[in-house]
Structure formats: structure tokens, C-alpha cells
Amino acid sequence: MNASGSDRNDLDILDFMPEGAFVLDEEFCVVFWNQCLEQWTGIQRETILGTDIGITFNHFSEQKYRNRINYVFRTGSSVVFSFQLHSSLIPCQLPDGRERIQNTRITPIPNGKEKGRFHALVTIQDVTDLNQSIQKYKLARKHLNDEIQERKRMEERMRQTEKMQALGQLAGGVAHDFNNQLGGIIGYTEMLERKLHGDIKLTRYTGMILKASRRAADLTRQLLAFARKGKYQSKPVNLHELVFEIVSLLEHSIDKRIRIDQQLEANYCITVGDPTQLQSALLNICLNARDAMPHGGVLSFTTMNVTLDATFCKNCDGDPKPGPYIRLDITDTGIGMNTEIQAHVFEPFFTTKDVGQGTGLGLAGTYGCIQNHNGTIKLQSKPGEGSTFSVYLPMHGVPETPIPADKPNNRQVGSGHVLVIDDEEVVRLLACDMLEDLGYTTHACSDGDEAVEYFSMNADKVDLVLADMIMPHLSGPDTYHALKNIRNDVKLILVSGHTFSDAAQKTIDAGALGFINKPYEMSTFSKIVANSIQHGKF
């Protein structure tokens, strides 16, 4: 059916629309086809007028679309829907084969010939580009939100790192000064104990003083480990052997209701570091796992070889470098931790245990020790689901043959002249008293300048020099080089309340005999001094 002339004139305004528009009668025949559709489809108006719209647009041959048009005819209400229009229907407009998204609105308009009857005005708006723009906007917004969240995570990590560094500086300073005082307490108590000649009551008192002092010394070592003061003496360490030793210790000390599992699957398990410090660090994790399973459970050790990439390392505490690592997972089936506890678990003096049951230094020391070995540590935990501490340590080359550790001996007496250099009076006097008690003669200097002056006049009679690492004016390493200029074969041992450092290693490489940690233990101290004087080595 063709539109009448009057109808045609009334519909001419549709030619000015930027959207495609056509008009259908109740038989679904086209009575108007606007110029926009002519441009879109290449189908001229004269060709399509009077034809069933389903012939041109297959969508409109489907019953669901015809039902919508019938609804308009029946009710006089508008209908809006979307559909995808494939290029095969409009080849001249969409040569690339893309599907276009069309928003279609069907609006009733009066039939000029029959009162109360309607034609259906169908307008088609191509929203493909708009939809693509919306999708691009949503994607850009998602990327922006991701970047904001990542920035927040980085800022939080930086704040946490700065907080831990500040705590480390405080802990390190306190531990170093406290170590000097402990050295005096332990050393003089050991000497006093020898003078008591078996007085049972008094030796029990000195024994308790030594026990408490050594426990305090252990705490300062944990503080220094957390503070990452210096580096430990390094040698190849077999991580599997270390785990075996830890398991052996635990089997004799933890609740029998806790089962220990081992899945040591790393093909290569050699790292480099201080085995004693690493054992202590890992044992701290195990003891916390034990406390988290008061009614029993499973404590498991799992190892694997992994390669850490730059992205992973960037999101780790410390400063691990990309490369091959040994990963050790220590997992318990205990009570677990919420996110708030996890945020503080590595901080010194933070503990969830009852008063008197924990110092809050165990995991803090572990944190510092692992980072000091160029590794990192991660925690995963949920309340009621246990915890997993994942320790990452760099893999090392083929290990050297380990040197058997010497068994500790009792105090070893000797003879010779020892120059003691230390700016802490109590440490300086203690070293002289201990040495004189062992049979040596001593001379004490409070700084490097004084020592150089004394040595320049007495170089031939000095058999050994004990020099503190950190002193005003001349440090221990500087003092060594100054003394070496006076006598090339001078025997010098470095002493410090801090752990082993790069500066100490460089001085040893330059010829110094070795390094001793404060506080001194009489048996170890006496043996080192005797060997150094007699054999020129530790």
C-alpha cells in the first residue's frame, strides 16, 4: 500500500532527521522511507515503498519484532529496543563486516485515511560508536581506579617501610648500648664466679645473674637482627639440612599432638648466609606456629625453587633482586590471624600472647634476619585457617666443603701483651681484667688516636690489638690501617656490639685477623686471643 499524497507531504519532515526512519502500515508494508535510510542502505525510496519490511530487514520478519509493531498498532503506545544489524543487510554502509548496534523506537502516528487507526513510525539510531566510546570510558576509568589503588598500596608500603626503618634505628641504637653494659655484667660475673671457690649459695646467685644476662644478650641480638645492623658472616648454607636440624630440635620440644610434615622438593637448596642466624630466624616462626596450635595440629615445611620477577620484588618488603630463589613455606593449622594482626606481626615488641609469655621480638628478628640475607618474607593467614610464612632466600652457587665447627673449650690461659682500644670504659676495663685474669699484660686506650701514639712507641712489645669498630676520631678499621703503617705484621681483632659488617670484612681482607661480637664469653674469648697470639689466626 502506498501513502497518499497528503500523507506523503506530512511525512516529508522525516527527511530532515539525522536518524534513519521509515513508516509501516498495519500489513508491515513500507509507506515512507527517509533520505537518511537511502544514504545508509543505498535503497531508493521508490524501490522499497509498498514492500514488506521483513524482505529488507530480516529482524522485522521475526515474530517477536512483528509482535512489538502490532502492540503499537493495538495500543497506540511506543516501543523501544536494540538490535544488531549486520553488514550483509546494508553492504554499502558497512563494508568491513562489523556488526552495528541500533537503538530502535517504534512510535504510533495517525493514519490520515482511517480515524483511530495508526501507522508505525520506526526510527533507527546507530549507537555503535557511542557504545564503543562508553566502553573505552569505562575501561579508562577502570585503569585509573587500578592505578589509584596501586598508588595507595605503594604509599602504604612506603609508610610501613619507613616505620620499620625508624623502629630499626631505635632498636639498633638501644641494643648496641645495652650490649656494652651486658658485656660488663657477664664478664665480671664470670670472673666473680671463679673467685668464689665453690661457694654453693653464692655461685647459685652468680649463675642466675649469668642466665638472666645471657637471656638479655639474646634479646639484644634479636633487636640487632631486626635492625639489620651490618651483615652476618657468610658461607654456603644447605637449607634442607637446616630444616632437618630445626625439625630434630622441635621433635624433642613441642607437643606430641603436633605432627611435623616435610615436603622438601627444591632441586637446589643452597643459599649463602649465617647458618646460626638463619636457624634462629626460622625457629622463631616454628615456635610461633607451635603456640598457635595449643590443641595440636600439623606443622609443615615445604621447599621449592622459584624465579622472582621485577614485579614480584617490587611488591616485597626489603630489597630482593629478581632471580632464582629457594622458597621455604612454614605452615601451621592453628588459630590464624586477622588482617589487623598481620599488619603488625613483624614489629618489635608486638605480641598477642599474655603478659610474660612473649617479648614480641621473635618475628621481628626473623624479619630483619631474612632481609639482611637479601631475601624477603611473606605471610598468608585467616582466622581459624592457620598461617603460612613464605621465606625467600637467594640461591647460591656450588657450595664449598663446610668447615667442621670447633667444640667449645674451657678458658684457655696464655701470655703476651695486648693493646685494648674501646671508647666505652666498662667494656675497656672488662677486657683488660679478663685478659689479665688469663695471664696477659694489657694497656688500654680510649680512642684510636691515643692507641696510634702508644703503638708508635711500643710496637715491638704489642702481641695483639683489640679495637672497637665504632669510635670517635679513628674507627677500628682506620686504626688498623694506621697501626699497619707503623708495623706491617700487626695482629688486630675487631670488636663490636653490632653484627658483622662490610667494613669489618674489608678490614679482614686487608689483613686483620677477625671479628668478635660483644658481649664476650670467657671460654670463646680466651681461645680466640690465645690462637691469635700463638698462631696468628682465630
Image (spheres, helix red, strand yellow):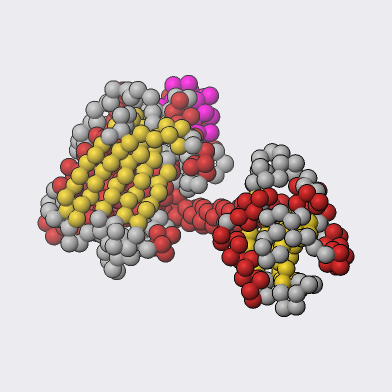
**In the rendering, at what x and y percent does residue 60 appear?**
63, 56
Residue 449 at least partly seen: yes
The answer to whether residue 132 is above or below residue 302 is: below
| In the foreground, 145 or 30 | 30
**In the rendering, at what x and y percent does residue 485 appear?**
53, 24
> Quick one: which residue is furthest to the bottom in this view?
116
Residue 125 at least partly seen: no
| In the foreground, 35 or 270 | 35
**In the rendering, at what x and y percent does residue 229 appear?**
45, 45
Q: Is residue 492 magenta?
A: no
| In the foreground, 4 or 537 | 4
Classify residue 117 as left or right of residue 371.
right
The answer to whether residue 369 is above or below residue 125 is: above
The answer to whether residue 451 is above or below residue 107 is: above
The answer to whether residue 531 is above or below residue 260 is: above
Which residues are drawn in magenta? 476-491
Quadrant placement of the N terminus: bottom right
Dominant secondary structure, magenta: helix
- The residue at 48%/29% (across/down) is 506
